[in-house]
Amino acid sequence: MSRFYPLDFRLMAMSQFQILALLCQTAASAINSALNQFLAQQMVSSQAVSREVFEAQVVALVEQMQTTTVANVQYIDQLVSLVTFNSGIMSALNTNYYLIYNPLSSIYYVERGNYAVGNYMISNSSNPNNTYCNCQLMSNCAFQAGYYSYAIRPLNAQLSPYLPSPPPKLVVPGILVGCLPHDSMLLSTLECFYNRSCLSLIGVSQAIIPLNAAAASSFRVNTTVNTLFEQLFVETWQNSSNFTSYYNACHLEACSYTYTQPGNLLYAMTMLLSLIGGLTTVLGILVPLLVKFICGLLIKCRGNAVLTIENDPAGR
């Protein structure tokens, strides 16, 4: 067993930071996978759409991808957490369950973690209402992490709650500890990493530069890790779409259309008169020419016939 008290920062810090790194890796992996699947899809439409419609459809598809990715990551994380809690798996840190040795029977048995609820910074007043947070009944028991000058572990078969006294020498701002590193890390904030004094308190090298609290961000300094994880640690999503490329691939080479207009009697009469008038004009031009052509043809044929009769030998 560890020589540190269960709520001591030095006991759970490494596990919590490993959890934080795992959450970041999970979010990054999920985003990369979702982006690859999204970019492999094709946008199909029955006809080329306008720029406004195109951009609206792209925004809707991107938002759907974001929502689906966040939901999938949250589902897996909650499933793992729920299975771990309901299975009663004992943490290697002995923070949710611990072993008790019974010298009479020479056996060990498992006892649940039972934390006194209250302000641990006040000596002898850590549990004014005599209430406790039982790690067997809930996994989100969370308390301020600190540096304790002692270790406390139950030594007999009786239920011995984790009741710290005196209070911790120091507390780590924003960092909570409790039954399990995963659940307490989600309830913690990263405000300590914005403060040089706090980083020095937890033993971080002076070469590590604190985060800039004045930098523009979508999240506040005291935002919980759970909120950050729900947003996949993403500040903003930037969408870039190219309507020109889409239109060049989808535009039509040619198009035609028909226009249907309902007819009426006046319209029909007008069209008929127009046709008759046009026909009269055409005939007025063609008929004289045709008559002249026929007359010329007849005269020519008659002249040829007279010439033939005059040259006939039988008539001599």
Image (spheres, grey):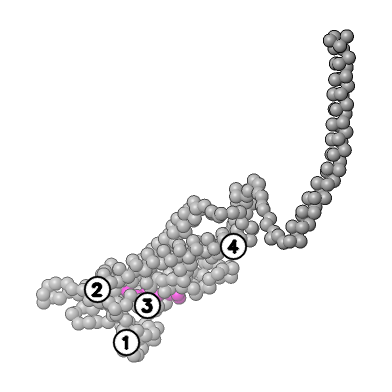
Amino acid type of the residue tagged 4 in the rendering:
Ala
Q: Which residue is mark 1?
A: 131
Local SS, label 2: strand
Label 3: which secondary element: strand
Q: Quadrant of the N terminus?
A: bottom left
Task: Mark 4 and mark 3 in contact? Answer it, CB < 8 Å.
Answer: no
- Foreground mark, 4 or 2, reads 4
4 or 3: tag closer to the N-terminus: 4
Q: Which residue is mark 2?
A: 98
- Report the side of 146 relative to 54 (left or right): left
Distance of label 3 from label 2 (alpha carbons)? 17 Å
Q: What amino acid is found at the position of numbered circle 3 in the picture?
A: Ala
In the rendering, at what x and y percent does residue 298 appear?
Answer: 85, 27
* Residue 251 vertical placement versus 85 (above, below): above
Disc 4 + disc 2, Cβ < 8 Å: no
The type of residue carrying mark 1 is Thr
Left or right relative to 130: residue 303: right
Q: What residue is disc 4 on?
A: 56
**x then y, percent, for residue 191:** 49, 72
